[in-house]
């Protein structure tokens, strides 16, 4: 049996291959995120002249809600096609399944950001390209994926997985939302780093704690 | 391949270690950062604030400084002080029940340098850390009727 | 065809039991503490009559956080030992935690309006954390009630029970960056303890609510045990049918 790094890479390749062939997750995520942006634009634009105020919230709510679609799809697919049973019948380390899921979701969310940012720039008529935004986006995406992967794997066993995932996941992700929105807002307002550095650190700590805690418990959610 | 139970125990130790270290770091981080929640009157007067900067000012209400408009009881003026620095505040709205002389208040709004007046739109009070029973003499004269 | 001897099911939730005595003591405690805190305790110097809510708010807040801690520990023990008694404890503590957190949130905002001047403050770490905790454990209970109760779903619920607890301090400290409204807890900042005329009714209410929670917990545990018995009996009937 190859080592864990090798297993993670193979599983990551598998996830990407499925996604590349079906293009299912990225397409739904993108269309959904775009819809969210449009809905927010129509709900708030009349009330505020300054669209820049909306950007952090709209950006992160779009990412958060789209991640739920992707996570649900990713795990229910494995259950439907019995792929999980197949994977578990090999001496695979469950931890490598978790890490590969986190990597895939992070990768897809980063891809979503790459499409979403230019679209938002056009639709909201204000540039949101700042290099400082890159670490915030990556850390936020890791946080969403780290918690999302274990919660999605948890609810994938139940009948009402589509409804339960957001109900359980979103409150758990509150520190990430708080940190990312505050940091994004400060970056867009071109504030100095020390005003939002703490928030980036909080999101990073959240990522570390939840990745380790979930990694330790992931095997409970798939073992039968 | 080593025994899976042994492998899990090793991971458990590493995981718990990392989680504890991160939590401690998080706590120290928050302790350092939680100072700029409100400004005191002296900080407000020293700093160079713009009229459109929303500020949360915290301090004690100066004894005897509360002045209510006779026609509109919701309009009031009072002085927020901290030792000997004072900021006059104008506020329009309902006040919490424990608002009064020497109450600890937080007001949110805008400060105008030229007229030296803080226009507040939100007024919050904080109850003191200790609780003391009301002494008998004060019960007989209801403090709410004094203004 | 019944060739098996009738097994008499062992019922835990009997209508009259030792619990009745404890229930009566609890009721008396609640009555005495309510009388003491509402009538015989003096009015507080600054907050006046509004401070009375302190006698229910603070004990229940302690109980709420304690029950969530019990959920965490019991979930961990269940994951480690795989003994269903820990799982039962986790579930019942979560229910008690939700009950007391709900009362704490409502009584807190009733207290906050006259004393702070606001029903709710988003900049207070304790309020926001309590609400988020309430949401997470509602999700936990929903997960448990919406899924079939086999060993798998029970195990995965424990994972959420653990993650939810880990989330509490992170939420608290991330919201703490704005904290300003709550003073330090009166009893913990032990530099100045409140006078005995306030402290005694407080401790008595604390004891009374603790007793109420224990009664609920025991009744609930017995009920859960009976449900488990019922499942076993059902399986036996199924087994007989196919014999």
Image (spheres, rainbow, N blue to C red):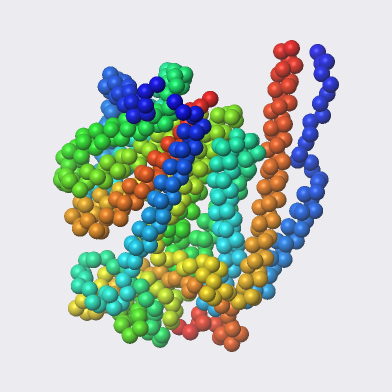
- In the displayed structure, would residue A115 be above or below residue C56? above
Q: Is residue C170 visible?
A: no
Q: Percent x, y for residue A151? A: 44, 36
Is residue A55 or residue B95 the one in the foreground? Answer: A55
Image quadrant where one finds the C terminus of chain C: top right
Exactly how many numbered labels are in the figure? Answer: 0
Residue found 55% across the figure and 60% down from its top = C107
Residue found 57% across the figure and 53% down from its top = C66
- In the displayed structure, would residue C29 be above or below residue B125? above
- For residue C36, what is the image quadrant? bottom right
Image quadrant where one finds the N terminus of chain C: top right
Q: Percent x, y for residue A3? A: 37, 26
Q: Is residue C101 visible?
A: yes
Is residue B63 or residue A20 the one in the foreground? Answer: A20
Is residue A170 or residue C168 the one in the foreground? Answer: C168
Q: Percent x, y for residue A196? A: 27, 55
Q: Percent x, y for residue A82? A: 45, 18
Task: List the single residue furthest toward the front.
Answer: B2
Residue found 30% across the figure and 48% down from its top = A180
Residue found 44% across the figure and 28% down from its top = A94
């Amino acid at each position: 049996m190859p080592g864990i790094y090798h297993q993670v890479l193979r599983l990551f390749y598998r996830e990407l291959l499925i996604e590349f062939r079906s293009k299912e997750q990225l397409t739904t995520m993108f269309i959904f995120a775009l819809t969210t942006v449009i809905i927010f634009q129509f709900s708030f634009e009349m009330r505020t002249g300054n669209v820049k105020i909306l950007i952090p919230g709209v950006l992160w709510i779009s990412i958060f809600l789209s991640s739920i679609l992707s996570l649900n799809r990713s795990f229910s697919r494995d259950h439907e096609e019995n792929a999980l049973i197949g994977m578990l019948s090999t001496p695979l380390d469950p931890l490598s399944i978790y890490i590969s899921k986190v990597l895939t979701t992070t990768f897809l969310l980063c891809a979503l950001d790459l499409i979403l940012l230019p679209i938002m720039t056009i639709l909201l008529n204000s540039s949101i390209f700042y290099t400082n935004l890159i670490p915030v986006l990556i850390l936020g995406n890791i946080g969403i994926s780290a918690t999302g992967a274990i919660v999605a794997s948890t609810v994938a066993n139940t009948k009402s997985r589509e409804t339960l995932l957001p109900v359980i996941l979103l409150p758990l992700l509150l520190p990430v939302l708080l940190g990312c929105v505050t940091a994004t807002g400060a970056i867009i307002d071109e504030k100095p780093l020390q005003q939002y550095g703490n928030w980036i650190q909080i999101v990073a700590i959240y990522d570390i704690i939840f990745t380790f805690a979930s990694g330790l418990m992931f095997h409970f959610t798939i073992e039968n | 391949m080593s025994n899976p139970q042994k492998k899990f125990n090793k991971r458990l130790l590493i995981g718990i270690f990392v989680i504890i270290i991160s939590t401690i770091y998080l706590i120290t981080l928050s302790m350092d950062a939680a100072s700029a929640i409100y400004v005191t009157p002296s900080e407000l007067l020293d700093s160079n604030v713009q009229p459109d900067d929303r500020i949360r000012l915290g301090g004690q209400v100066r004894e005897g400084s509360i002045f209510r408009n006779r026609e509109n009881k919701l309009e009031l003026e009072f002085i927020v002080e901290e030792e000997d620095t004072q900021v006059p505040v104008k506020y329009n709205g309902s006040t919490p029940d424990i608002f009064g002389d020497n109450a600890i208040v937080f007001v949110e709004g805008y400060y105008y340098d030229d007229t030296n007046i803080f226009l507040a739109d939100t007024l919050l009070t904080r109850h003191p850390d200790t609780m003391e029973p009301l002494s008998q003499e004060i019960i007989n004269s209801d403090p709410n009727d004094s203004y | 065809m019944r060739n098996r001897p009738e097994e008499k099911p062992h019922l835990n939730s009997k209508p009259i039991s030792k619990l009745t005595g404890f229930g009566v003591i609890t009721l008396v405690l609640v009555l005495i503490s309510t009388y003491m805190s509402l009538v015989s305790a003096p009015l507080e110097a600054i907050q006046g009559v509004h401070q009375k809510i302190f006698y229910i708010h603070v004990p229940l807040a302690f109980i709420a956080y304690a029950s969530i801690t019990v959920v965490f520990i019991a979930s961990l023990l269940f994951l480690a030992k795989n003994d269903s008694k820990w799982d039962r404890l986790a579930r019942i503590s979560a229910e008690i935690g939700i009950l007391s957190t709900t009362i704490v949130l409502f009584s807190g905002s009733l207290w906050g309006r006259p004393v702070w001047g606001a029903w709710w403050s988003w900049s207070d770490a304790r309020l926001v954390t309590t609400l988020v905790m309430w949401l997470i454990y509602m999700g936990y209970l929903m997960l448990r009630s919406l899924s079939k109760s086999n060993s798998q779903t029970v195990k995965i619920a424990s994972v959420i029970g653990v993650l939810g607890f880990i989330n509490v301090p992170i939420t608290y400290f991330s919201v703490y960056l704005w904290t300003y409204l709550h003073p330090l807890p009166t009893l913990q900042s032990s530099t100045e303890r409140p006078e005995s005329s306030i402290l005694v009714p407080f401790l008595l209410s604390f004891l009374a609510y603790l007793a109420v929670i224990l009664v609920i917990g025991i009744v609930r545990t017995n009920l859960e045990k009976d449900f488990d018995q019922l499942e076993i009996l059902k399986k036996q009937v199924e087994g007989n049918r196919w014999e």
